[in-house]
Image (spheres, rainbow, N blue to C red):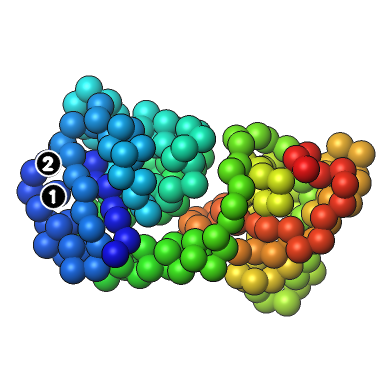
Amino acid sequence: MAKLLVVDDEVAMRRLIRMNLSDEYEIVDTGEPEHALALALEHKPDAILLDLRMPKYSGFELCQMFTSFGSTQLIPVLVISGEAGSSTKEFCRGLGVAGYFEKPVDFAALRAQLAEFLQTRRRERRGESRVKLRVPLKLTGTDVRGKQFAVLTMSENIGPSSFLCATNVEMEADSTVEVHILSGGQLAGRARIVRSDYQDSQYPRYACRFIEKAENWVLN
């Protein structure tokens, strides 16, 4: 059974999540955000559900900690918050959050998002860690409408055979792109889109894995 870590200072919210998800997931929860990192390291959850407004630690601080710390950066973080502003959602996306759900939670949509993450992780089973590194890239390919594109972007993190980036081009999962390192314009290889997040935002985020890679890639 997959495991979720729930971090929310509201007892009622933690209880509601348990009621709706415990049939499919093992739930580890805490109302004390200062313990969240230790629990993540101990239990190695498949995903983290995180409130934003909590005492002592804010959810924003925890987001940054989870998505930048080497031992937790591959765990998808989904924010569950009463804040509905688009600026808050975009800020969370910039911190590396994989999904954003407003309260009251649409649990059907949350289940679907969690199932997609777990399917992707099983399919990828990537055996490499990524480091938070911003590298200017140019991607060329065909979007969901069959239109050719060439777009500049910046990686959010990279691995020896993969990278994560955001772009305003809508791309299909399993499609391929050519990747150029912008400094020098050198071809780094061809990559497959293995996961997409924030499809309803202006800048969807894409996890890409090389299927052909040149020797000039940043990490080898």
Residue at screen point 49% across, 47% down: 74
Name the quadrant containing residue 3.
bottom left
Query: Looking at the image, can residue 4 be seen?
Result: yes
Locate residue 165 relative to residue 110 in the image: left or right.
right
Give the amino acid type for the residue marked by disc 1 in the picture.
Met
- Towards the viewer: 39 or 210: 39
Give the amino acid type for the residue marked by disc 2 in the picture.
Glu
SS state under label 1: helix
- Towards the viewer: 80 or 121: 121
Locate residue 68 relative to residue 162 in the image: left or right.
left
Contact between marks 1 and 2 (CB within 8 A): the answer is yes
Name the residue beneath numbered marker 1.
13
Name above or below for residue 106 compared with residue 59: below
Q: Can you name the residue that lies furthest to the top here?
A: 56
Name the residue beneath numbered marker 2.
10
Name above or below for residue 97 compared with residue 21: above
- Towards the viewer: 158 or 128: 128
> Circle 1: is it few (<14), some (14-19), or many (20+) Cα within 10 Å?
some
> Circle 2: is it few (<14), some (14-19), or many (20+) Cα within 10 Å?
few
Q: Quadrant of the N terminus?
A: bottom left
Query: Looking at the image, can residue 150 be seen?
Result: no
Residue 88 placement (x, y as % from top left): 38, 40
SS state under label 2: loop
